[in-house]
Amino acid sequence: MEITALYYLVPSLIMFCCGLYGFLTRRNMIAMLISLELMLNGVDLNFVIFNRFLFPGQMEGMIFTLFGIALAAAETALAIAIIINIFRWVNNIDIRELNQMKF
Amino acid sequence: MSPVIPVIILALPLFMFIFLGLCGSKMKHPVAGFLGTLGLGVVMVLSYYTAFTYFFSGAPEFISAAGERLQCVMFDQTWLQFTDTLYISLGFFLDPISAMMLVVITTVSFMVHLYSLGYMRDHHGVYEIGFQRFYAFLSLFTFSMLGLVVATNIFQMYIFWELVGVSSYLLIGFYYRKPSAVSASKKAFIVTRFADLGFLIGILILSFYTGTFDFTLLTSAPVEGMSGVYHVDINTAEGILSTFTSHPAPVFMGASVLTWALVLIFMGGMGKSAMMPLHIWLPDAMEGPTPVSALIHAATMVVAGVYLVARLFPLFLMEESALVIVTVVGALTAFYAAVVACTQIDIKRVLAFSTISQIAFMMVALGVARPEHHESLGYMASMFHLFTHAMFKALLFLGAGALIHAIGSNDYTAMHGLRKHMPITHWTFLIGCLAIAGIIPFSGFFSKDEILSACGSYSTLVYIWMSLVAGLTAFYMFRLYYLIFWWKEHEIPAGHHAPHDQPWTMSLPLIILAAISCVAGFIPFGKLVSWNGEPYDFMAHFDWGVASVSLAVAVAAIALATVMYRKENALPAKFKNALPNLWKWAHLRFYWDELYMFITHKIIFNGVCRALAWFDRHIIDGTMDAFAAITHKASDVIKPMQSGQVQMYTWLYVIGALLLGGITILCLM
């Protein structure tokens, strides 16, 4: 049995959809952040897969993934800082309560 | 001659305007006035030099071997290129009439600059508010007027034409705290602007059919339809007007396009030169300071219309009907203005109407000029009269300014018997009156006589009509003279000193202009200025019969004025009572202003403007308001979508992305 790209793509898709579902439904901002990371990882996986199957001799996809991981780390730090600040100000990190920024 | 001098002639007044306009208020009053006068003095000397070189140097670019005076473009800078042949350039054009105008403008302007040093301050020597601004505007005017007369193409002329209009507006409204001055300046601006609309359309028609703005090309057209074919042989550029001479010539509404173009251009000239029915702004323009009236509204700007017709004279010759219109308008205006001038009380108004009448004389002279009658004597006569009139009318206005300055009123009833108090003003004013009345040997006699000869060779009716107007001219000028300087003096109220002559800055211009008015008639003008550049001796065309008749008419009119106004008597009242309606109509200027007010206020404002205002308020504003209201309502509807719920935004985004992706895939399949 040959392992084709599909075998990798399906889990990556599942990961992404799980992340999306979590992002849309969870109320806790930390949980939303985790879901976001899940989506990001699904996307990173796609880069690696396509690089491996379409351009086997090249490294661009891999490098891009490394960048993606680095960015994700930075972004997580930023997001956590924001969340902590919000918690300090309003004592709450429920996204549905945080709706002051509207018309 | 190097082109540096022409550039300086144009650039120096412009520089003085900018300099005095920006830095004037930082300077002391006399410094600003002195700088302005000095700058203009330099321009005057350079202009004299230019004119002298043009007329007398005999250089090959100015005069041909056959003794014909040539048109010479000193420099020409392309400014806006439309097509290969159609472009607007700014340049310096020398020909007999522009060289003459350089002398006239700079002389009168210098006199006015000098005179204003004395005039624009009160009896205690305190300068008027805005003294520096006044000099800045005078410089602007001089620059614009010089640019107008030396224009190389009709569009440059139009640009400077508008600039003189602006300077005139600024100077009429110089006393902007006075409501009458403000409304007079607006009136002058609007009336002339209305006329300039015709001018612009005329220029566009002309340039559309000829493909050029250039005067050299436009006036070098073969003149057909006259006895024989005359060439204004200035340049080899022939046939640029073949559109007009070819058969069939383009026709619009029963008249050829050339007629339309010329009549519309003449309309611009009518506005600027205050020909009937566009004359109504000039009497009101007397609200400005008197030196301004002398410079702009007597000597230079108002003759721009005459200059324009003279400049395009070869074109007018191609279309006789346009010249007839010029004649008729001129003749009617001359008579009208002369009649009105007999009944005015304000001395500046009398002079204003006299100016209108004299400019109409020049127009008539151009209108009756034909190459077959004494080689277009009328053209030369018109330019000659322009020259002499500028000098003696500036003199009269400056004299009137001296009187107003001394008395503090424009009204002759406040003057009377001033000849003992103000001898210099009296004698110079008398010379001006004699010149305008046409008494030998003063300058007006010669130029007016040439005009009457030209009229006589064209048509007897025009000759008799214009002689009548000449008689009226002598009558109303001497009426004014006697009313100001004779009659019984007013008692001087206790505590006031008697009116007296003015300081030398005001007297000197009067004396110089009076001297010019005495001798200018002997200038052999025909040798210098003629329609096609060929010098001729006008004494050969001098008609002693015409001269003696016009002299007799003038003397008779002066005699009549002497009988009626030499001393206070019952005769004028008798005349007035014998023809009460005529007097009243003339005194109220034949209700022209009322007619204009009626047309504008009653008909245009009520009929047209109200409908337009309604349309503006309801249709245009309504449409815009409706747009605003729709936007407002729509925003109320969609506003709740911005709920602040981040997850809702994400939902919408995901749905939108899926939809777009689906559409893309569908399209690709």
Image (cartoon, coloured by chain):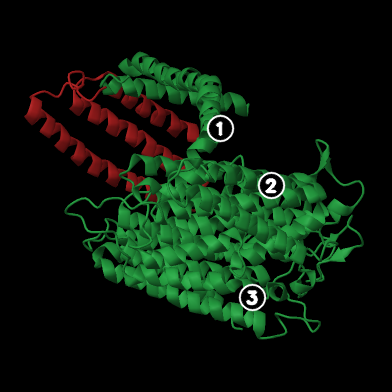
Residue under disc 2 on the same chain as residue under disc 3: yes
Query: In the image, which disc is placed on residue B331?
Result: 2
Q: Colour of chain A?
A: red
Instruction: Using residue A101 as the reference point, say whether residue B133 is left or right of it.
Output: right
Alpha-carbon span between mark 3 and mark 1: 45 Å
* Label 1 – label 2 distance at C-alpha: 27 Å
Q: Is mark 2 on a helix, strand or loop?
A: helix
Check disc 3: other Cα within 10 Å, few if <14, some if 14-19, many if 20+: few
Badge 1 marks a residue whose secondary structure is: helix
Amino acid at the residue labelled 3: Ile
Corner quadrant of residue B152: bottom right
> Residue drawn 53% across and 74% down?
B7
Q: Name the residue under label 1.
A: B578
Q: Do the residues labelled 1 and 2 touch (CB within 8 Å)?
A: no
Image quadrant in which the N terminus of chain B is located: bottom right
Tell whether B604 sits left or right of B415. Answer: right
Which residue type does callout 1 highlight? Ala
* Residue B367 picture location, percent across and down: 74, 53
Q: Which of marks 2 and 3 is nearer the N terminus?
A: 2
- Amino acid on which disc 2 is placed: Ala
Res B523 label: 3
Sequence-wise, the earlier of marks 3 and 1 is 3
- Which color is chain B depicted in? green
Cα separation between marks 2 and 3: 27 Å
Chain label for disc 3: B
Q: Quadrant of the C terminus of chain B?
A: top right
Q: In this view, does B567 lie above or below B39?
A: above
Point out the tag, 1 or 2, that comes first from the N-terminus: 2
Query: As rendered, which of B82 and B277 lies closer to the eye?
Result: B277
